[in-house]
Amino acid sequence: MPSVQRILCPVDFLEFSGLAFDHAQSIVSHYKATLLLQHVVDSLKPYYPYHAFPDEYDELCRKLRADAVQQLQEFAKTHNWRGVPTQCIV
């Protein structure tokens, strides 16, 4: 039997993220592994003229990341029906 130490579960906060998290929890429980939840914040570079307003761009990026961290932690809290310890990565 393979040794599984970590399970990575990507989260985009859509309906299927909850289903994927439920499935990941059952795998983690079976293997006694660590569950990592990951959300990726998309870069704004193609959409935002960051070269014109670098301070505002940096502040916007910090806010987007902070909001994503909070949203991912809330997602983990509300969907963790097995009490599996999770690490949130943004």
Image: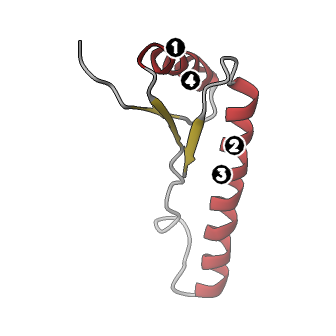
The residue that disc 3 covers is: 68
Structural crowding at the residue carrying mark 4, measured as other residues with C-alpha within 10 Å and reported as few (<14), some (14–19) or many (≥20) = many
- How far separated are the C-alphas under marks 4 and 3? 17 Å
Graded by Cα atoms within 10 Å as few (under 14), some (14 to 19) or many (20 or more), the crowding at tag 1 reads: few
Element type at mark 4: helix
Q: Disc 2 and disc 3: Cα gap in Å?
A: 8 Å
Q: Are marks 4 and 3 in contact (CB under 8 Å)?
A: no
Dividing the picture into quadrants, the one containing residue 6 is: top left
Decide which of 34, 21 is in the foreground and name it: 34
Mark 2 lies on residue: 73
**Residue drawn at x 58%, y 36% as measured from the top left:** 86
Q: Nearer the viewer, residue 71 or 25?
A: 25
Q: How many numbered dots are placed on residues in this image? A: 4
- The residue labelled by disc 4 is 21
- Could you tell which of marks 4 and 2 lies nearer the N-terminus? 4
Q: Earlier in the sequence, mark 4 or mark 3?
A: 4
Name the front one of labels 4 and 3.
4
Callout 3, which amino acid?
A: Ala
Query: Judging from the image, what secondary structure is the residue with disc 3 in?
Result: helix
Confirm or deny contact between disc 3 and disc 1 (CB under 8 A).
no
Relative to 61, residue 54 above or below: below
Say which residue label 1 marks.
26
Q: Is residue 16 above or below residue 51?
A: above
Disc on the earlier residue, 3 or 1: 1
Q: Give me the residue at 51% from left, 15% from top.
A: 23
In the rendered structure, the answer to whether residue 81 lies left or right of residue 84 reads right
Q: Are marks 1 and 4 in contact (CB under 8 Å)?
A: no
The three-letter amino acid code for the residue at tag 2 is Gln
